[in-house]
């Protein structure tokens, strides 16, 4: 099944990034829309025709501004400025484009001198001080630039337009990401603006080998999607594979990096994520340095990283900023929490309903006491409490802020306290479910696969006890071993094992000992540095 | 090629290690102690050396016919018909071992964990899980064992170290009570079980450094031998001969009796979990060998197509063979060694001899 999906991905025709529309792939003219009888693709020499064609193509959208004026130093020349209100900095358009074209006679002599020249070239090269000017004649290119916040200038008698960069729109300022908070380390997080995000990354890695490739995805949204990597570090095959997968995306809109994630995954039918995400530029920079590739999507602060391995869920950016000894303990706390989040309810079910003999007697007695008078079997109890916990969690995320208090009172007091006093659930179950819930928050990146796996294991435990849990976990293990993220085994460096890579998984080796990149990524250059254990110089 | 995967030396070692250790830890200790009493360690040593010698035969054959599994090179050596018959014998042996391990496991589960669950259900689950791994290919099989093998060590080491305080060295007496001939005779039993390592003949073809296969097998069987001897010796010193032989699963019983400081108890849970996990790895490896061998005999391109048929037939056969533990134990004690040694020792040596005659000593 998976192999079939993969094959399809390769075989599928490459859908071009928007710009060279192909009739069969461009969904903007699907069957239910009237197709323009004579589609004009390029500008004409007549300004009036151009204006009417453009107006027709934008179909009377009201935020579009068509400003007609005469070029100052050649009073007969009509010109047309087109931009979208709200996407451009009006000041900039007025002061650097309109002012210079309408008023600025200072250079008129120059113009007379260069009269033989093309007026368009003159404006581009002498008249308008703008940092990024392009010349397009394709209608589609011009419209696209206007839609992205540039200003287009069309002159009468010329069949190409000048595009001035004039982008200026409001966005969220750089702030500390709410999902990945740290005690030590940079506080800045990505924003919704792609340009800002790329600049944040550029400031982290000052190197010409930091390559940024750009595509426009989504036949209707035409979202800019970038992928970044460090050439001379990353495995070239990986870049090629990612480029192929991105280019074969055929969808009408990309609104968040999650769209891209689901369209390029290796294992779309697995509950485990094979593409990582982060909101922090320092994390992304660290992943790039390890030889991974980052994908940034305009309009979302979540950057994707590939390949994504299971062990990355156990690592946090802070592990590398703090000194290594306590970090090793923290790593193990994460591993233990993951185990608790996976196994605790299942183990409770198995022990209560199949093997009360497997736990020490005093514990058994106290658990039995707590269960006295409870009408449900253990598994019903655990399933109900788990369900309630998930409901509370979801309510906690979605509810409007002001009602928060009500939910926490209902959740904490009514359900927890009253349910156990009314003998509906035992105290032990409440403790276990709460502990499970807390533990699953320790590893946020597996936040959606752990509850599903837990449910899977609980089902096994209900039918076959400890043996069932074991079989369930072996199925999960085999599945995880089978998974690959962009060709890299998902459970590496545990299986296939690699002792060098394990020193950043089971323990956290000090920074001076971590001199190699993860071997499994097949990087171009696996040596990060040659630092040795620091020691004071002997004289 | 039915299989394109490659395995590393570490994976090779862990595959043989988990396969062998898990088969040895169920009821075999009882049998071994019953046969040779305090001299069981000598028997194990003999077994180790004879199996290490057998490994040389496999290594030589594997080097002479690189990239070929034992099924394939028996056809190269003996010609298409005789070779197919030999290959089929091997496949039958692997399926037979699958069946034995399957029954041993399900009987163990039914005895210690799920006393009221029908054995059928347990068999079904075990087979389905192992065939799921088999269909995922050799690399997955190897990686599963790579993860499980070190985990199998944990409960064993805990059992061995926390029972040290109850060791009574007096139980080791008398030593050397058996003649060499008697030792050799009782080493038949353990050698036949060690012989399951002939799966080496399959996996050597996919080893990325076939020159290291022999060393890898030696490492695997020597570590298993050390662990087994330690386990057997602690059984004898702690329980004594008669109590050990009364137990159905002596190692499990040993784990049950561990209690340190009134709270560190119930180690047997750990033992059960990792023992079953290890045995499942063994089951996966044997299942894989049988299915792959079958596909190679009949030249089927995708061995995965055979897996469901193999699984269903195993399931049906498992319903009517060895209906109870005694029957299985009688079989393993009386009949199994002769049958197994024929396949493990005689057939492969015959292959070597014929190969030397037909293809000369200096085969490229």
Image (cartoon, grey):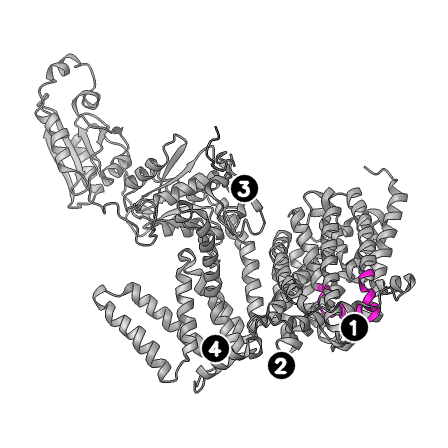
User: Which mark identifies residue B241?
Assistant: 1
Q: Secondary structure at mark 3?
A: helix
Residue topped by disc 2: B116
- Cα separation between marks 2 and 1: 31 Å
The answer to whether any part of residue B149 appears in the image is yes
Picture residue at 17% right of the left edge, 14% below the top = A114
Above or below A394: residue A102:
above
Crowd rating for badge 3 (residues with CA inside 10 Å; few <14, some 14–19, many 20+): some
- Cα separation between marks 3 and 1: 51 Å
Q: Which residues are magenta?
A: B23-42
- Cα separation between marks 3 and 4: 44 Å
Residue topped by disc 4: A379
Report whether B195 appears left or right of B273: right
User: Chain for mark 3?
Assistant: A
Above or below B307: residue A73:
above
- Cα separation between marks 2 and 4: 18 Å
Foreground pick, A25 / A172: A172
User: Chain for mark 1?
Assistant: B
The prevailing secondary structure element of the residues shown in magenta is helix
């Amino acid at each position: 099944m998976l192999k079939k999906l993969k094959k399809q991905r390769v075989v599928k025709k490459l859908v071009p990034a928007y710009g060279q529309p192909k009739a069969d792939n461009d969904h903007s003219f699907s069957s239910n829309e009237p197709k323009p009888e004579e589609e004009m693709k390029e500008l004409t020499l007549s300004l009036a025709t151009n204006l009417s064609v453009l107006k027709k193509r934008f179909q009377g959208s009201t935020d579009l501004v068509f400003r007609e004026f005469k070029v100052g130093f050649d009073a007969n020349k009509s010109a047309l400025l087109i931009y979208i209100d709200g996407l451009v900095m009006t000041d900039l358009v007025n002061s650097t484009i309109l002012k210079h074209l309408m008023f600025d006679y200072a250079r008129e002599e120059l113009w007379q001198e260069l009269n033989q020249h093309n007026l368009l070239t003159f404006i581009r090269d002498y008249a308008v001080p703008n940092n990024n000017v392009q010349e397009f004649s394709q209608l589609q290119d011009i419209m696209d630039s206007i839609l992205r916040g540039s200003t287009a200038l069309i002159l009468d008698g010329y069949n190409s337009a000048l595009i001035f960069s004039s982008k200026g729109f409001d966005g969220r300022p750089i702030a500390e990401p709410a999902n990945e908070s740290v005690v030590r380390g940079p506080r800045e997080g990505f924003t919704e603006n792609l340009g800002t995000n790329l600049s944040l990354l550029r400031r982290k890695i000052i190197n010409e080998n930091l390559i940024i490739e750009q595509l426009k995805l989504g036949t209707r949204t035409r979202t800019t999607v970038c992928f970044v990597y460090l050439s001379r570090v990353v495995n070239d095959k990986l870049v090629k594979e990612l480029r192929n997968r991105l280019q074969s995306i055929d969808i009408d809109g990309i609104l968040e990096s999650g769209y891209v994630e689901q369209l390029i995954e290796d294992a779309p039918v697995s509950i485990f994520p094979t593409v990582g995400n982060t909101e922090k530029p320092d994390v992304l920079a660290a992943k790039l340095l390890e030889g991974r590739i980052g994908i940034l999507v305009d309009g979302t602060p979540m950057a994707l990283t590939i390949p994504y391995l299971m062990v990355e869920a156990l690592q946090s950016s802070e592990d590398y900023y703090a000194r290594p000894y306590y970090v090793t303990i923290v790593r193990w706390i994460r591993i233990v929490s993951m185990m608790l989040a996976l196994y605790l309810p299942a183990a409770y079910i198995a022990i209560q309903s199949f093997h009360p003999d497997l736990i020490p007697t005093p514990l058994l007695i106290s658990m039995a006491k707590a269960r006295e008078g409870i009408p449900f079997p253990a598994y019903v109890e655990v399933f109900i409490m788990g369900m309630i916990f998930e409901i509370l969690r979801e309510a906690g995320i979605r509810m409007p802020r002001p009602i928060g208090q009500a939910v926490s009172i209902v959740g904490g007091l009514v359900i927890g306290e009253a349910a156990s006093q009314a003998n509906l659930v035992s105290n032990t179950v409440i403790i276990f479910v709460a502990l499970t819930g807390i533990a699953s928050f320790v590893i946020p990146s597996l936040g959606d696969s752990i509850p599903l796996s837990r449910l899977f294991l609980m089902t096994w435990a209900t039918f076959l006890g400890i043996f069932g849990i074991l079989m369930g976990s072996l199925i999960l293990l085999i599945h995880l071993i089978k998974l690959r993220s962009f060709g890299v085994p998902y459970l590496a460096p545990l299986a296939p094992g690699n002792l060098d890579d394990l020193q950043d998984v089971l323990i956290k080796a000090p920074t001076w000992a971590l001199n190699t990149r993860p071997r499994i990524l097949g990087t171009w250059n696996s040596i990060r540095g040659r630092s040795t254990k620091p020691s004071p110089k002997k004289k | 090629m039915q299989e394109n995967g490659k395995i590393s030396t570490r994976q090779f070692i862990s595959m043989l290690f988990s396969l062998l250790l898990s088969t040895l830890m169920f009821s075999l200790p009882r049998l071994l102690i019953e046969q040779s009493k305090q001299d069981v360690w000598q028997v194990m040593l003999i077994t180790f050396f004879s199996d290490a010698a057998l490994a040389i035969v496999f290594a030589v054959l594997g080097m002479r016919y690189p990239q070929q599994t034992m099924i394939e090179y028996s056809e190269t050596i003996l010609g298409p018909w005789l070779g197919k018959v030999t290959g089929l014998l091997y496949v039958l042996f692997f399926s037979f071992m699958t069946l034995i391990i399957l029954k041993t496991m399900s009987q163990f589960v039914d005895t210690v964990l799920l006393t009221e669950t029908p054995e059928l259900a347990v068999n079904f689950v075990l087979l389905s899980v192992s065939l799921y791994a088999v269909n995922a290919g050799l690399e997955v099989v190897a990686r599963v064992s790579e993860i499980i093998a070190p985990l199998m060590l944990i409960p064993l080491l805990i059992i061995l170290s926390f029972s040290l305080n109850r060791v009574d060295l007096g139980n080791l007496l008398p030593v050397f009570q058996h003649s060499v001939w008697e030792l050799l005779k009782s080493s038949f039993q353990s050698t036949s079980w060690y012989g399951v390592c002939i799966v080496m003949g399959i996996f050597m073809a996919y080893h990325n450094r076939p020159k290291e296969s022999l060393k890898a097998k030696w490492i695997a069987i020597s570590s298993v031998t050390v662990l087994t001897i330690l386990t057997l010796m602690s059984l004898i010193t702690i329980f004594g001969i008669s109590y050990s032989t009364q137990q159905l699963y002596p190692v499990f019983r040993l784990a049950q009796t561990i209690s340190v400081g009134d709270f560190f108890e119930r180690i047997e849970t750990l033992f059960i979990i990792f023992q079953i996990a290890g045995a499942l790895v063994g089951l996966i490896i044997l299942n894989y060998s049988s299915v792959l061998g079958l596909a190679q005999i009949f030249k089927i391109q995708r061995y995965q197509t055979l897996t469901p048929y193999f699984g269903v037939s195993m399931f049906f056969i498992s319903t009517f063979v060895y209906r109870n533990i005694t029957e299985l134990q009688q079989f393993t004690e009386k009949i199994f060694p002769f049958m197994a040694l024929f396949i493990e020792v005689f057939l492969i040596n015959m292959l070597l001899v014929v190969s030397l005659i037909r293809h000369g000593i200096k085969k490229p």
